[in-house]
């Protein structure tokens, strides 16, 4: 199985940068996903990492270190609309279709 | 864009009732999933299906069953609803032929069992 840990809550100011960490323990790592979920809405896909390094998509970047079982999601130039829950999910090679999710990190952006 | 729809946004049922949650996706995806989401626990996989008439148990299948008679539709069934099944239920689909096999989620059904 997988143990996936991420902080419960983070607060930041509009225009700032926030880094959400995710650590995991898994047998047969096969990819890590980040999703954004606004209150009462469906999770939406943000990023995917399977190799070590940084993936950048506009204001959002995601980093992976497989040897450390560690990822982070970096949100730059924060906007009020970035207030949401951010979910880290790990896929295992033992079954390619299954994702294991962390409990999510609620980010609150303040003016 | 991928579209995953769920039959209801909100449902209120009584203990012991049989409950059907329907999910439809319009992107011809092979894989479909049912999760429940509870505060502090994250998304937990109930059942998934990688083809028509195929199903696999997820991490918490007890008290649930599923049906996949057509590729686009995946139903979750609560044979006899109980209060501990009050939760947000999320359906997702993914395409195995794609590189990342990203899952796309429906809007969710918030089920309350009284």
Image: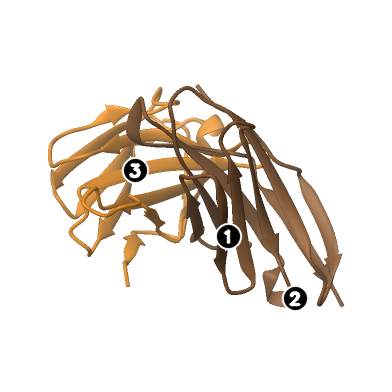
Chain colours: A brown, B orange
**In the shown orientation, is residue B70 left or right of residue A77?**
left
Q: Does residue B2 appear left or right of residue A107 in this picture?
A: left
Element carrying mark 1 = strand
Residue A54 visible, this orientation: yes
Sequence order check, earlier mark of 1 and 2: 1
Pinpoint the chain carrying mark 3.
B
Residue B44: x %, y % from top left: 50, 35
Report x, y in % for residue A60: 62, 66
Label 3 sits on residue:
B33
Q: Residue at x 16, y 33 (%)?
A: B54
Q: Are marks 3 and 1 on the same chain?
A: no
The residue singled out by tag 1 in the image is A36
The CA span between labels 3 and 1 is 18 Å
Q: How many numbered badges does the structure rendering display?
A: 3
Picture residue at 19% right of the left edge, 55% below the top: B72
Give the camera-side residue of B46 and B13: B46
Q: Nearer the viewer, mark 3 or mark 1?
A: 1
Query: Distance between the Cα atoms at labels 1 and 2?
Result: 16 Å
- Residue at 21%, 51% in the rendered image: B97
Nearer the camera: disc 2 or disc 3: 2
- Residue A75 falls left or right of residue A65: right
Q: x and y percent of residue B75 in the render? A: 27, 45
Residue that appears at 55% across and 30% down: B84
Q: Which residue is mark 2?
A: A77
Residue A21: x and y in percent read 71, 46
The label number, if any, that marks residue B21 in the structure image = none
Q: What chain letter is assigned to the residue under label 2?
A: A
């Amino acid at each position: 199985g997988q143990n996936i840990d991420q902080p419960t809550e983070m607060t930041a100011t509009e225009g700032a940068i926030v880094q959400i960490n995710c650590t995991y323990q898994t047998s047969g790592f096969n990819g890590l996903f980040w999703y954004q979920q606004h209150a009462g809405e469906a999770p939406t896909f943000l990023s995917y990492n399977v190799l070590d390094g940084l993936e950048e998509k506009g204001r959002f970047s995601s980093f992976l270190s497989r040897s450390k079982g560690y990822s982070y999601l970096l949100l730059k130039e924060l906007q009020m609309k970035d207030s949401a829950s951010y979910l880290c999910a790990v896929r295992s090679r033992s079954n390619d279709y299954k994702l294991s999710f962390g409990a999510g990190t609620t980010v609150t952006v303040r003016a | 864009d991928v579209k995953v729809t769920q039959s209801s946004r909100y449902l209120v049922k009584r203990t012991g009732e049989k409950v059907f949650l329907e999910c439809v996706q319009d992107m011809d995806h092979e894989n479909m999933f049912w999760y429940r989401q509870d505060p502090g626990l994250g998304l937990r996989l109930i059942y998934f299906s990688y083809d028509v008439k195929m199903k696999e148990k997820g991490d918490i299948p007890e008290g649930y069953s599923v049906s996949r008679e057509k590729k686009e539709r995946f139903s979750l069934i609560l044979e006899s609803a109980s209060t501990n099944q009050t939760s947000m239920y999320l359906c997702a689909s993914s395409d195995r032929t794609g590189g990342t096999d990203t899952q796309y989620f429906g809007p969710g059904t918030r089920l309350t069992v009284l």
